[in-house]
Amino acid sequence: MGSPSYTPRHGARHAARSRPGRGTAAIRAAARRPVIGGAVAVAMLGSVGATVAIGDPMGAGGISSAALVTSQQSAAGGDADRATRSVGTTDQDTARLAESRRSTNVSRSASREEARRLAEKQKKAKEEKAEKKARKKKAAQEEREAAKPISERDFTSTQIAGIQADPKPYAIELMREYGWDDGQWGCLEQLWIGESDWEWNATNSSSGAYGIPQSLPADKMASHGSDWKTNPITQIDWGLNYIKLSYGTPCGALNFWNNQNPHWY
């Protein structure tokens, strides 16, 4: 056990270290402050995180929650604008497509109408050409027929009707074909006025004689044409041939007829 008054060789140094002095206290205080400040900082960061999480007006790093909301709203607004622009663009595309289709339909309708008019024009031109050709062919045929002797002509039903109404002009031409001059015409005209009055369908009720020359029997005239019942040309041709063979001339036939009572030849 040492004396109370003993001071070890290193005692003063240890004592100085072991007694807290002002400088030592200051150093320790300075050392403690960072530790305390760090803890507070951690706590503050946790608090800020919690605050941001629960919607505190001030977010981390001093950023306002309102600013974040505004940013989100701007983004949403941008999306809305883009959507609106997209809808507008779609509507414009739809309108352009509709206009294009309308223009195409109008163009097609115009093309079809033009094609229809062209077809009608071509059809009309073709019909007119065919009609002109037919008229030309008919005129040529009529010209050829007119050049034939009357006894050899092919008459249409319309022409036959005209001849039935007035057979005398044709009788004159037929008389000339038989080689008689126009001086015989008066005799022939008078003879057949007395027989039938130049009626193509004149019928003798007692004898059955028929036609302009009063053929008896009536069907004798079939030797000059199967149309003897209705065609005055056939009847006249037969009658002139009969006169030539029987009396030589129309005047010879009329002379014989005048000398008969009742008249006949």
Image (cartoon, grey):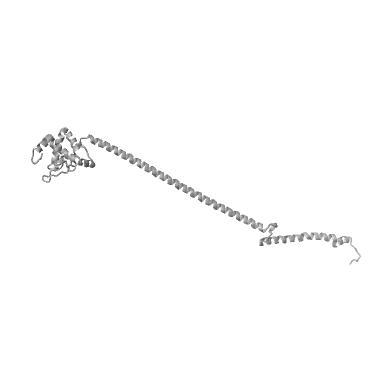
The image position of residue 15, as x and y in percent, is: 87, 62
Residue 180 is at least partly visible in this image: no
Residue at the far bottom: name it.
Answer: 1
Looking at the rendering, in which quadrant would you find the N terminus?
A: bottom right
Residue 193 is at least partly visible in this image: yes
Q: Is residue 109 above or below residue 150?
A: below
Closer to us: 174 or 36: 174
Locate residue 122: give its quadrant.
Answer: top left
The image position of residue 221, as x and y in percent, is: 15, 41
Locate residue 134: give its quadrant.
Answer: top left
Closer to us: 68 or 174: 174
**Residue at (81% x, 61% y) in the render:** 29
User: Viewed as shown, does residue 81 lie left or right of 162?
Assistant: right
Tally the numbered discs.
Answer: 0
Closer to us: 26 or 214: 214
**Residue at (79% x, 59% y) in the render:** 31
User: Viewed as shown, does residue 155 lie left or right of 87?
Assistant: left
**Residue at (52% x, 52% y) in the render:** 91
The image position of residue 97, as x and y in percent, is: 49, 49
The image position of residue 62, as x and y in percent, is: 70, 57
Closer to us: 106 or 205: 205
User: Viewed as shown, does residue 122 lie left or right of 231?
Assistant: right
Locate residue 245: give its quadrant.
Answer: top left
Looking at the rendering, in which quadrant would you find the C terminus?
A: top left
Q: Is residue 50 above or below residue 154?
A: below
